[in-house]
Image (spheres, helix red, strand yellow):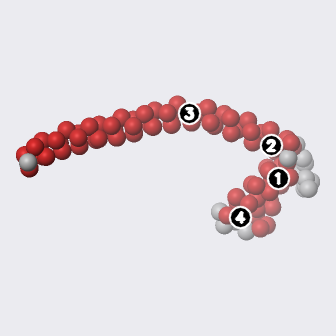
């Protein structure tokens, strides 16, 4: 019985390992294939939201910078600089 059990274990182990390798390969292929598509759609969404809901987008950027550990005055400077570039505001003008 032990010999039969051993002879069945090896093929099943190989099949399971091969199945896992195939799955990992397909996952990698799909990730590489969909990443550029996802990037394009995310960028379009962010650009649309920047136009439609600029205050919320500015708050989202500020929150992210604060989570990264930046001080409040630096966060405000960076967010205002981004607004100036995106919305064409001059130096010293703020978009509230």
Q: CA distance from mark 3 to mark 1?
A: 28 Å
Q: CA distance from mark 4 to mark 1?
A: 15 Å
Residue drawn at x 23%, y 43% as measured from the top left: 13
Mark 1 or mark 2: which comes first in sequence? 2
The residue carrying mark 1 is: 56
**Closer to viewer: mark 4 or mark 1:** 1
Q: Helix or strand or loop: what does disc 2 sit on?
A: helix
Query: In this orientation, does residue 78 appear?
Result: no
Question: Are circles 4 and 1 on residues that touch, CB within 8 Å?
Answer: no
- In the rendered image, which quarter is residue 65 located in? bottom right
Furthest toward the front, the residue is: 1
Q: CA distance from mark 2 to mark 4?
A: 21 Å
Question: Which is more toward the observer, 15 or 1?
Answer: 1
The residue carrying mark 3 is: 34
Task: Pick the quarter of the image with the C terminus.
Answer: bottom right
Locate residue 91, reporting x and y percent: 88, 52
- Indicate which disc residue 66 carries: 4
Mark 3: few/some/many CA within 10 Å (<14, 14-19, 20+): few
Mark 3 or mark 1: which comes first in sequence? 3
Q: Helix or strand or loop: what does disc 1 sit on?
A: helix
Residue drawn at x 67%, y 64% as measured from the top left: 67
In the depicted structure, whether residue 55 falls above or below residue 18: below
Mark 3 or mark 2: which comes first in sequence? 3
Question: Are circles 3 and 4 on residues that touch, CB within 8 Å?
Answer: no
Mark 1: few/some/many CA within 10 Å (<14, 14-19, 20+): few
Mark 2 or mark 4: which comes first in sequence? 2
Locate residue 92, reporting x and y percent: 90, 56
Q: Helix or strand or loop: what does disc 4 sit on?
A: helix
The residue carrying mark 2 is: 49
In the depicted structure, whether residue 1 falls above or below residue 35: below
Q: CA distance from mark 3 to mark 2?
A: 22 Å
């Amino acid at each position: 019985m032990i010999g039969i059990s051993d002879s069945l274990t090896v093929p099943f182990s190989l099949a399971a390992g091969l199945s896992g390798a195939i799955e990992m390969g397909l996952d990698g292929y799909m990730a590489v294939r969909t990443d550029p598509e996802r990037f394009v759609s995310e960028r379009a969404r962010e650009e649309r939201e920047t136009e439609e809901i600029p205050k919320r987008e500015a708050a989202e950027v500020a929150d992210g910078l604060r989570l990264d550990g930046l001080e409040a005055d630096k966060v405000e400077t960076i967010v205002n600089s981004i607004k100036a570039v995106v919305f064409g505001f001059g130096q010293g003008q703020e978009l509230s």
